[in-house]
Amino acid sequence: MKIAVCVKQVPDTWAEKKLQASDSTLDRESAEGVLNELDEYAVEECLRIAEASGGEVVVVSMGPERAGETIRKALSMGADAGIHVVDDALHGSDAIATSAALAKALEGRGFDLIVFGSESTDARMSVVPAMVAERLGLPQVTFAQKVEVDGSSVRIERQMDYGYDTVEASLPAVVSVVEKINEPRYPSFKGIMAAKKKPVETLSIADLGLEPSAVGLGAAWSVVDEFAARPPKAAGTVVTDDGQGGVRIADYLSEQKFI
Amino acid sequence: MSEILVLVEHADGAVKKVTLELLTLARSLGTPAAVWLGSGASADALATLGEYGAEKVYVADSADLDDYLVAPKAEVLARVVADSGAGAVLIPSTAEGKEVAGRVAIKTGSGIITDAVGVAPDLTATQSVFGGSTVVKSKVATGTPIITVRTNSIAPEASAAAATRVDVSADVSDVAKSARVTGRTVAQKGGRPELSEAAIVVSGGRGVGGADGFGVVEALADTLGAAVGASRAATDAGWYPHQFQVGQTGKTVSPQLYIANGISGAIQHRAGMQTSKTIVVVNKDPEAPIFELADFGVVGDLFAVVPQLTDEISKRKA
Ligand SMILES: Cc1cc2nc3c(=O)[nH]c(=O)nc-3n(C[C@H](O)[C@H](O)[C@H](O)COP(=O)(O)OP(=O)(O)OC[C@H]3O[C@@H](n4cnc5c(N)ncnc54)[C@H](O)[C@@H]3O)c2cc1C
Ligand SMILES: Nc1ncnc2c1ncn2[C@@H]1O[C@H](COP(=O)(O)O)[C@@H](O)[C@H]1O
């Protein structure tokens, strides 16, 4: 079983995220970059599948130079090798271009499973897995709360509003996982040491056979016209319960015409 | 005026409220045309779409659209986009809606904007990003704008139109039929409104203390006709079913009123409720970050405050 796991480096969840005035792209320098939390579940699931059925896990990430740290993090959890798509021309890529670059990097390497997190905490689009499946013409089994693979097929429980759907496809397939699927492991000291020696291949867009004009900010199919910090919310009223807290809320809800 | 396609969200043959919101929005952008994918497009359902302004309803009726995941829907919708020469496509910002949108964008060579909370007549979309801290206006520069819109962003208003049924081919390629839905497991569902659509959401967190504690949250919700939500701490502990989780990895809700009980307001929780119009908080810790969002907050024990509130509402309603 050859498994790819796509991970993204994102600004630390707790850091204040800002767009840059110069080109309306996310300021990735000012905050610490971390492995997208939701991708940790994807890495964990791949490791479990590889441990159960034998196989190799390759971490794939597109991002600036420092995204290499994120690949190392996944390697220290136990993945075997990395592919880093890095090129200045990629700056400002939208989901369309990101999915194009990832699809090229994944294509032709004989992956049986290509696994994603369900959402990046910065872009929050939840579209890249479906887009990659579309580009590669592979079955998509996404938002999995449970994944079962045998030699030739995959079956998932797809998280739904009302419960879940069972979905089946043959391999190779594209999978995305939700956070309740597992509990990601922490890298061990041994894992961190071992990760330093694991191979990471770097690919430029020329290596992928993409034109610089096809990716990056200039090629984005949607553009930010303007952005602004939301005007700070007027401070609300906070009272301490003096035995009448519930009545006070009812008064407020009446004033606001909710009751 | 060009057609503005609205992908109909439906379940068991009934049109979901978000569709009516999108039709209302579509009327300000062009001529609304609904697209119904899958079985169940009854005369009643079409009449509802007409009531909210759908001039046409494209119907692709085939079990393939229900039995295989996402790809067939995208294939048919992309064909309708191409054949109709539509000016834009509006899709509900649900997990599946976004996946369909992403694939249609690639198939039609179009840009995509997700999670819009508004769309101006020139098709500039407004998004609220980074947990609501930044408002972004953006526009699709290539192809047919594919825009997914959050539930509860627009108040639905009726305006009658013809709702002429136009049957379209539901044929899909074999590649699109590669992920088969083989089972459906429905977790029990109460009589409350659906979380992502509800006008009022009452939610509980770790402060509720256990599964039993959710009784006070549910009682308040029921007097208000509200949906019940929960923080991840509460769903992870098994106190409340997972599908009611609000936040980054749960539902994004944007109701008129959100009442948070015993929830601290972690960034991942805020990401799912920050755009609620009015926020009321009950928490015994005055330092809890959720108070930063509160329009009205009470520092106190929820087991005292919430039942009192429920009683008071019942009294005032009687
Ligand atoms: C990848 C990832 C994804 C996540 N996704 C989500 C998500 O989608 N949704 C989500 O909610 N969280 C999510 N989280 C978890 C999030 O970080 C918090 O841990 C969680 O929201 C905390 O829930 P809580 O506020 O209920 O609990 P706590 O933070 O423990 O807060 C409980 C609050 O209850 C108050 N309280 C206690 N007793 C009482 C009482 N008797 N009366 C009144 N107040 C009382 C306390 O003062 C405290 O403020 C995610 C985390 C990660 C890492
Ligand atoms: N630049 C990237 N490199 C690798 N994987 C990515 C990248 N961007 C997104 N992904 C993957 O796609 C998923 C969904 O991202 P998004 O559509 O941006 O919400 C993430 O959880 C990652 O698994």
Image: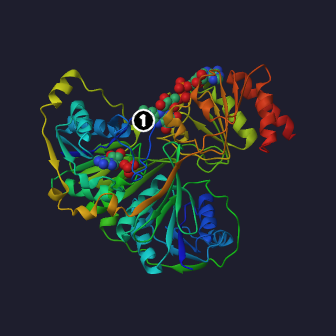
Q: Position of residue A247 (x, y in %)?
A: 80, 29
Q: Position of residue B248 (x, y in %)?
A: 48, 41
Q: Nearer the viewer, residue A16 or B179?
A: A16
Q: Is residue A23 left or right of residue B135?
A: left
Cβ of disc 1 within 8 Å of ligand 1?
A: yes
Q: Is residue B72 above or below residue A133?
A: below
Q: Residue furthest right?
A: B318
State the image quarter where residue B279 is shown. Answer: top right
Is there any visible trace of residue A155 in the rendered image?
Answer: no
Q: Residue furthest top?
A: A242
Report the quarter where the C terminus of chain A lies. Answer: top right
Q: Identify the chain of the residue marked 1, using the numbered disc in the image.
A: A
Q: Residue at x 55, y 54 (%)?
A: B150
Q: Is residue A50 above or below residue A206?
A: above
Q: Is residue A97 above or below residue B318?
A: below
Q: Which amino acid type corresponds to the residue marked 1 in the rendered image? A: Thr
Report the quarter where the N terminus of chain A lies. Answer: top left
Q: Position of residue B194 (x, y in %)?
A: 61, 48
Please name the residue that numbered disc 1 is placed on: A13
Q: Position of residue B249 (x, y in %)?
A: 46, 41
Q: Nearer the viewer, residue A83 or A182?
A: A83
Q: Nearer the viewer, residue A62 or A153?
A: A62
Q: Is residue B281 left or right of residue B93?
A: right
Q: Residue at x 54, y 80 (%)?
A: B166
Q: Is residue B129 above or below residue B71?
A: above
Q: Residue at x 58, y 54 (%)?
A: B151
Q: Is residue B169 left or right of residue A50?
A: right
